[in-house]
Image (cartoon, rainbow, N blue to C red):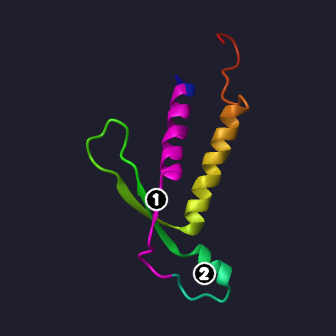
Amino acid sequence: MRGSLTLLAAAAVLSLAAYGEDIKPTVPAAAASSEQTADLDQVVCKRLPPLVGSRLGGRTECQTKKQWLALEKDTQDVLSKLQNGANQPTGPGK
């Protein structure tokens, strides 16, 4: 049961990250001393697909590029753990 929930959570995160469609930024990047820092602070809005089985349309989510990159990294970490068998039940009753 726990493995199913983890897999479901990973699938949900993937659907958010993989199917997100870039939309023009709604907030301009703040003026910063470093161009790279300003680039990571730029707000990016993505249109997300509707949830499976939902009759409602998708939604739009806005985050900074830094937050989108962190979400993508977390998703990759979860998937690599699942693929490497880190979610295998251990102990008695296996």
Q: Residue at label 2?
A: 38
* 85 lies left or right of 70: right
Count of residue discs = 2
Which stretch did the figure color magenta? 4-28
Q: Residue at label 1?
A: 21
The C terminus lies in quadrant: top right
* 75 lies left or right of 5: right
Q: Residues within 10 Å of mark 1 (few under 14, many from 20)?
A: few
Helix, strand or loop at label 2? It is: helix
Q: Position of residue 41 (x, y in %)?
A: 56, 75
Q: Position of residue 14 (x, y in %)?
A: 54, 45
Observer-nearest of 81 and 89 = 81
Q: Residue at x 37, y 38 (%)?
A: 52
Dots 1 and 2: beta carbons under 8 Å?
Answer: no
Q: CA distance from mark 1 to mark 2?
A: 22 Å
Q: Residue at x 37, y 42 (%)?
A: 51
Residue 26 colored in magenta in the image: yes
Residue type indicated by callout 2: Ala
Q: Residue at x 63, y 41 (%)?
A: 78
